[in-house]
Amino acid sequence: MGKYTDNLCAGMMFIYSFFGIALAISPRLFFGPDSKFCYWTAMDEAGCWFGRAGGVLLAFSTTAPYWAGIQKKAMAKMFLPCNALFLLQFINAAFFMKSTGPCAHNILPMNMWLIQIPVGVVLLALNTYALKEK
């Protein structure tokens, strides 16, 4: 397997399985209005439910090459539309949504979605390189 594909799968696992596990446990506790890592200034019951469900999906899908036998090259193909759409969602959350902070008690004095934009750009670039590998 190529280095870009390996790095993409590892990066996706390290970044998104962390978020996935935290979301699956408690979106409000880890990323809600009272969190030091506040991504959402408001989070209702439906948001928590979808956060937990999405977290399970993130955690299991991004770790799949390491436990389910799914080939990394196949995951790179699946990750491309996800990474493109994630980046658009990060931009939306960072600049256009009203319920995304910044929170006064954040560990960083900024909208936490701003951090996700360069992460999304790097993963999308890595993803395009991975798909060009033989």
Image (tube, rainbow, N blue to C red):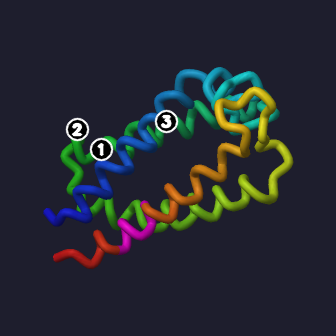
Amino acid tagged 3: Gly
Assess whether residue 41 is covered by the magenta stretch: no
Point out the frontmost of discs 2 and 3.
3
Residue bearing the label numbered 1: 64
Q: Position of residue 46 (x, y in %)?
A: 74, 33
Q: Earlier in the sequence, mark 1 or mark 3?
A: 3
Q: Quadrant of residue 54?
A: top right
**CA separation, marks 2 and 3?**
16 Å
**CA separation, marks 1 and 3?**
13 Å
Q: Quadrant of residue 76?
A: bottom left
Residue at x 50% of width, y 36% of height: 19
Point out the frontmost of discs 1 and 3.
3
Q: Check if mark 2's residue and mark 3's residue have beta carbons within 8 Å.
A: no
Secondary structure found at label 3: helix
Above or below residue 128? Residue 98 is: above
Q: Check if mark 1's residue and mark 2's residue have beta carbons within 8 Å.
A: yes
Amino acid tagged 2: Trp
Above or below residue 6? Residue 77 is: below
Q: Quadrant of residue 88?
A: bottom right
Q: Nearer the viewer, residue 46 or 3?
A: 3
Q: Mark number for residue 67?
A: 2
Q: Mark number for residue 123?
A: none
Bin the neighbour count of mark 3 within 10 Å (Cα to Cα): few under 14, some 14-19, many 20 and up: many
Residue bearing the label numbered 3: 20
Residue at x 58% of width, y 62% of height: 87
Residue at x 27% of width, y 56% of height: 7
Q: Position of residue 18 (x, y in %)?
A: 45, 34
